[in-house]
Amino acid sequence: MRWQRKMPGHDVRLSSEAVAPMRAELPRVAERVVDAVIEEVPSYADAFDSEMAATIRNAVQLALSGFLTLAGGRRGADTPRAPAVEGSYQLGRGEARSGRSTDALLSAFRIGARVAWREMSGTAVEHGVDGIALVEFADLVFAYIDELSAAAVAGHTDELATSGRVRQRLLERMGRHLLAGASPEVVHEAAQRAEWEPPSTLTAVIVPESQVRPVLSSLPAATVVLPEAPDLTEGVLLLVPDVHDAARAAVLRAVEGRGAVVGPARAWLAARGSYQRALRARLAGLGPDTEQHLPRLVLDADADALVDLRARALAPLADVRPSTAEKLTETLRAWVLHQGRRDEMAEALFVHPQTVRYRLQRLRELYGDALEDPDTVLALTLALA
């Protein structure tokens, strides 16, 4: 048995003359209990038309039978309770699978206790149970029901935890397929197994492990959590559904100040691209919004190529004294950024426009007609960005 709480010992011991007629009435009492639950708990209105009906009726009769065995047995007897407690535990698990809450479950137990007490106490009085014994009998009824209620709640909680873990594993498997670039057929099948409705887009969000819970509280419930993602040595990857366009702002607010990085929104089957960009931004120390760092991400995509490009673009300055080469490089950068506007260049460089004019003449001597070539201008723009 998975769960059983020790119920305090009791002093109730009904005579066999009282217990026998109560046991004979069990089927009728059980039906009364079931009818009352159906009438008073709305979420059970259709439960007894389902495959759960037999389980619930059997649980009621088992509980009542166990109680009568306990009431008519020796002091502190535990054995008669074990099947009823286990039955309540399994009932709780079944109710969780049916989608009913513990509120509905506990209401059913309270109603069952009231109806059972009313029916059985009447029979007890008819068969000579005195007032003192009847009070002790009532205490035993409600202590017993309290134990069964607790067992049912434990079963309900365990079922939700188990099903949650299973679904999380299935979602993680689907996420791994997405990041690995698996075929759409494989990913769709994984999503169906996880009972996850594919969104229009997914956005990759990398969050420090300590910040996952507060961030998740502000994100859609269908967000996929991946504690382990390829090349992610620290942090947790979240794949957030349908936060593209204007909805992106809500995600950025949720991660503000939490050391997170938010990739671009991508069609859900292309979520791998969002993750790769977020990962590159994180490695480069950029964030939280990768959309604000696109030029830097483009330039850093191939670091070796950028070094080679810079060397080739600045090759005409190779034989110039280092101090002069530095000033001319700054001037080239200003020339590119301000599209050759001399006054704006002078202001940016904190020099006189005449100095800018002199430096540009020197650059034209070194570069020649290449400064008029669009390809050279593009190379300088990238190299000096």
Image (cartoon, rainbow, N blue to C red):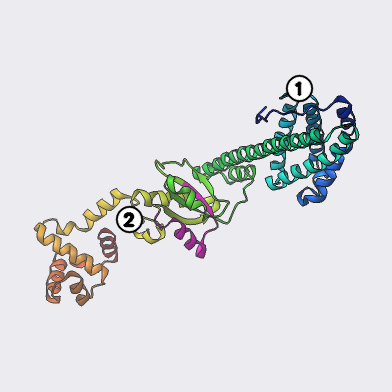
Task: Say if residue 370 shows up in the picture.
Answer: no
Q: Dot 1 lies on which element?
A: loop
From the top left corner, tell me how far across and down residue 339 is, in percent. 26, 72
Q: Quadrant of residue 137?
A: top right
Label 2 neighbourhood size at 10 Å, few (<14), some (14-19), many (20+)? some
The residue lying at 39 percent from left, 52 percent from top is 259
The residue lying at 72 percent from left, 29 percent from top is 10
Q: Dot 2 lies on which element?
A: helix
Q: Quadrant of the C terminus?
A: bottom left
Q: Residue furthest left?
A: 321
Q: As drawn, is 17 to the left or to the right of 266?
A: right
Which of 227/268 is in front?
227
In magenta, the rendered stretch is: 237-257
First-in-chain label (2 vs 1): 1
Depth check, mark 2 against mark 1: the one in front is: 1
Q: As drawn, is 122 to the left or to the right of 262?
A: right
From the top left corner, tell me how far across and down residue 176 is, in percent. 52, 41
User: What amino acid type is highlighted by mark number 1?
Assistant: Arg
Is residue 256 in the magenta section?
yes
Q: Relative to 205, does residue 81 appear above or below in the rendering?
A: above
Give the CA distance from mark 2 to mark 1. Answer: 83 Å
Q: As drawn, is 22 to the left or to the right of 298?
A: right
From the top left corner, tell me how far across and down residue 324 is, in percent. 10, 62
User: What amino acid type is highlighted by mark number 2?
Assistant: Leu
Task: Say if residue 225 shows up in the picture.
Answer: yes
Is residue 359 in the magenta section?
no
Mark 2 — residue? 299
Q: Quadrant of the N terminus?
A: top right
Mark 1 — residue? 74
Q: As drawn, is 312 to the left or to the right of 187?
A: left
Which of 200/227 is in front?
227
